[in-house]
């Protein structure tokens, strides 16, 4: 048997993203992640992942206009939201809402490439509205309808907080979306591709991906990182916290990676953003704590931060509740998941790995009264 956890197994060819784990590098369709984080809007990244080229201005205008017109919740989802807000956690709500939204997609069961592209964009467009509406409803606040002209990131802050966001805050959020948009064959993307490979529909594939992202070893790590920083409380406590946790064989959330052997390049961008944002907003304490955790975790275990550590710091300072941090990861990764699903459809073979049987052999059925 190969290494546990399908390490080193190539499950698909992709044009979307590539990682050099040894050197801590990541590219989307050939563009280095730092270049895109500095220069591209999330809308440009969505276009890039779905069309394998950066858009021209008319192409960007067209995709932006389509995304903006598709932001509204269907009446069905809007009616479900009070029940979901009362009874389910944010990721369970998101999984259910995205699944339920399939009933109202105007393209229905049309599985032409054009219809699949429109479905993908609708899923991307609706996710921020689902998350913000849920939060407004569960906190007893008036629901803010999507803004007709704001960007994907600014509109999310608008719907969540009910105020036009500071452009620098919207830019910071936009950059986190770019950083989270795709990441080769991570667990949730693999899940989406497995479902798509059975020629099941886009909504089923993405719903399953949300389920995979929910776990604390994958997308749940940003929330766990924030809770850890709150528990640490001040930078001076970081060293003892890490020592205790490692001594108890616990995980330090936001550290380590299945592929990177150096610092995750997304964490490098987020670390700087978290510091700048924290200082601008008068809350540098979180960067102080995360940086202290980084230094001591490296010293004690040789582990470097992954994307989730400093993303938690950025989201917290932007006023995002901790339990919405994984849904925001999903919001951004919706771009990658849907692009992978379309790529799978375009060159499909059902994904069906083998297994190695390690149980007992040559057993003979005994009637129940003779067992025990
Ligand atoms: C991401 C993760 C699941 C990768 O797991 P993996 O591929 O099995 O990791 P590795 O093979 O590099 O692990 C090597 C060793 O370091 C340990 N390790 C890895 N990450 C660790 C962490 N964050 N805290 C403590 N120990 C960790 C492993 O337990 C393993 O120890 P062992 O050899 O004694 O069994 C793992 O690093 C982790 O659980 N991180 C915390 C959760 C997280 O931040 N997830 C978000 C990922 S983007």
Image (cartoon, helix red, strand yellow):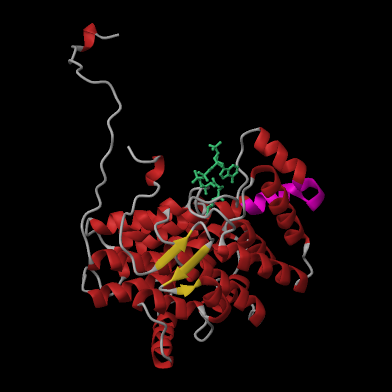
Quarter holding residue 28: bottom left
Position of residue 301 relative to residue 113, above or below, is: above
Instruction: Give the residue displayed 40% in from the left and 78% down from the top.
Output: 48
Quarter holding residue 70: bottom left
Q: Is residue 342 magenta?
A: no
Position of residue 254 relative to residue 139, above or below, is: above
Q: Position of residue 316 (x, y in %)?
A: 67, 62
Which residue ends up furthest to the top in the rendered image?
370
Instruction: Give the position of the N terminus as an image quadrant.
Output: top left
Range covered by the magenta-colored residues: 225-238
Q: Position of residue 187 (x, y in %)?
A: 41, 52
Taking 16 as reference, is 162 left or right? right
Instruction: Give the residue displayed 40% in from the left and 79% down from the top.
Output: 47
Q: Position of residue 11 (x, y in %)?
A: 31, 54
- The residue lying toward the viewer, choosing from 141 and 63, is 63
The dominant secondary structure in magenta is helix
Which residue ends up furthest to the bottom in the rendered image?
58
Where's ligand 1: which quadrant? Answer: top right
């Amino acid at each position: 048997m190969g290494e546990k956890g399908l390490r080193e197994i190539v499950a698909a060819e992709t044009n979307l993203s590539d990682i050099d784990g040894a050197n801590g590098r990541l590219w989307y369709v050939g563009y280095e992640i730092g270049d895109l984080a500095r220069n591209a809007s999330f809308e440009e990244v969505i276009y890039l992942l779905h069309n394998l080229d950066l858009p021209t201005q008319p192409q960007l205008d067209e995709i932006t206009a389509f995304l903006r017109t598709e932001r509204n919740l269907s009446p069905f989802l809007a009616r479900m939201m009070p029940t979901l807000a009362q009874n389910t956690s944010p990721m369970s709500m998101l999984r259910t809402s995205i699944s339920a939204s399939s009933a109202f997609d105007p393209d229905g069961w049309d599985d032409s490439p054009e219809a699949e592209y429109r479905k993908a964009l609708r899923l991307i467009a609706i996710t921020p509205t689902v998350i913000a509406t849920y939060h407004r409803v569960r906190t007893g606040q008036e629901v803010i309808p999507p803004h007709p002209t704001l960007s994907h990131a600014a509109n999310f802050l608008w719907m969540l907080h009910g105020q036009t966001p500071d452009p620098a805050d919207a830019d910071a959020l936009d950059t986190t979306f770019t950083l989270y948009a795709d990441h080769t064959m991570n667990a949730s993307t693999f899940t989406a591709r497995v479902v798509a490979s059975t020629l099941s529909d886009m909504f089923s594939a993405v719903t399953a991906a949300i389920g995979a992202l929910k776990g604390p070893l994958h997308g749940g790590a940003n929330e766990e990182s924030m809770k850890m920083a709150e528990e640490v409380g001040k930078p001076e406590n970081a060293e003892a916290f890490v020592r205790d946790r490692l001594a108890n064989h616990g995980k330090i959330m936001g550290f380590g990676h299945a592929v990177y052997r150096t610092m995750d390049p997304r964490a490098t961008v987020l670390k700087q953003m978290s510091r700048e944002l924290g200082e601008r907003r008068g809350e540098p304490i979180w960067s102080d704590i995360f940086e202290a955790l980084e230094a001591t975790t490296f010293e004690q275990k040789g582990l470097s931060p992954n994307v989730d550590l400093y993303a938690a710091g950025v989201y917290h300072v932007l006023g995002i509740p901790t339990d919405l941090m994984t849904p925001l990861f999903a919001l951004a990764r919706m771009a990658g998941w849907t692009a992978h699903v379309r790529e799978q459809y375009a060159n499909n073979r059902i994904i069906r790995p083998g297994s190695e049987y390690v149980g007992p052999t040559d057993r003979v059925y005994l009637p129940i009264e003779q067992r025990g």
